[in-house]
Image: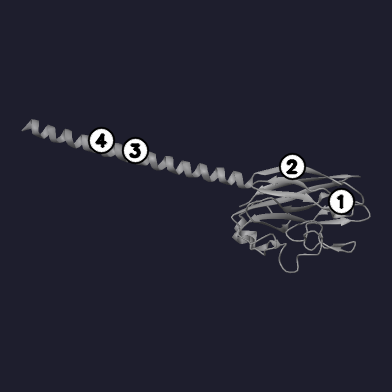
Amino acid sequence: MKKIILSIIALAAISITSCSSDDQTADSQALAKEQQISSATKKSALVLCSSTSTSVTVNRWQAPSSVDANWTPVAATIGGVNVQWEGIYGGSIRPAGNTDQWYVGTIDLDQTCADYDLWSGTIAVKNDTGNVGTAPASDPYNVLGYDGSISGSNYGLGYYSYNITTHVMTPAKAIVIWKTSGTNSQSITDPTTATEAYLVKVTGIAPGASSSTISYNWTQVK
């Protein structure tokens, strides 16, 4: 009888130990999964808010500098979007050479890498009615450069001002480039539907006699 009782106690102990071991394994797996999710979230946040500083130099192939077509466009990459710097002193930017549809607009210069969904509704969209000018004559859509009209040319919505006397170009807005569905570069799109987006801030435009250097930083915000 004693042997039977001892056997039952031993089996119960094994069962309790086994259950405890299973619980510990489940807890460890759950903790590991939480750590993986946390790590992925942190990595994603770092990617979204990581700022990259760079610059491009755009050359003028003939005078005068005040003609958009006299500046040779320069291709650049901002995250996952291809763009080109073009126009007077190379200060204008447009998406170019992409398979997907990308669009541009402006936001306050002090906008930071906060939750894109919270401020995307306040982006001024270049292709919106009233925001597209008549310059550059080659294609005034989906491009951001000078803001407004100057020397008889209407550039529509832009991001910088220009002092024609001192030749100083001053960024007044930040640039937003977003990917969403659209028919072509003239489509009016809603930045709140973006699947990917970048915040671009031009920090300086240094015009030279026959070239110009544009310095800027960009951050993925969506």
Q: Quadrant of residue 133?
A: bottom right
Tell me if mark 4 has few (under 14), some (14-19) or many (20+) residues whose alpha carbon lies within 10 angstroms of its own. Answer: few
The residue under label 2 is which amino acid type? Thr
Q: Position of residue 159 (x, y in %)?
A: 78, 57
Q: How is the image coloured?
A: one colour
Residue found at the very far right of the displayed protein = 165
| Element under disc 4 | helix
Q: Residue at x 91, y 56 (%)?
A: 164
Q: Earlier in the sequence, mark 2 or mark 1?
A: 2
Per the image, the residue denoted by label 4 is 17
Near-viewer residue (211 or 173): 211
Residue hosting label 3: 25
Q: CA distance from mark 4 to mark 3?
A: 12 Å
Quarter of the figure with residue 57: top right
Query: Tag 3: residue type?
Result: Thr
Instruction: Tell which circle, 4 or 1, labels the residue nearer the N-terminal end.
Output: 4
| Labels 4, 1: front one | 1
Q: Which of these two is toward me, 95 or 217?
A: 95
Q: CA distance from mark 1 to mark 3?
A: 69 Å
Badge 3: how crowded within 10 Å, few (<14), some, or many (20+)? Answer: few
**Label 4, label 2: how far apart the Cα atoms are:** 61 Å
Q: Is residue 113 rendered to the left or right of residue 139?
A: left
Of label 4 and label 2, which has the lower sequence position?
Answer: 4
Quarter that holds the N terminus: top left
Are the two marked residues, 2 and 1, in contact with CB atoms closer than 8 angstroms? Answer: no
Three-letter residue code for mark 1: Asn
Residue underneath mark 1: 70
The answer to which of marks 3 and 2 sits earlier in the sequence is 3
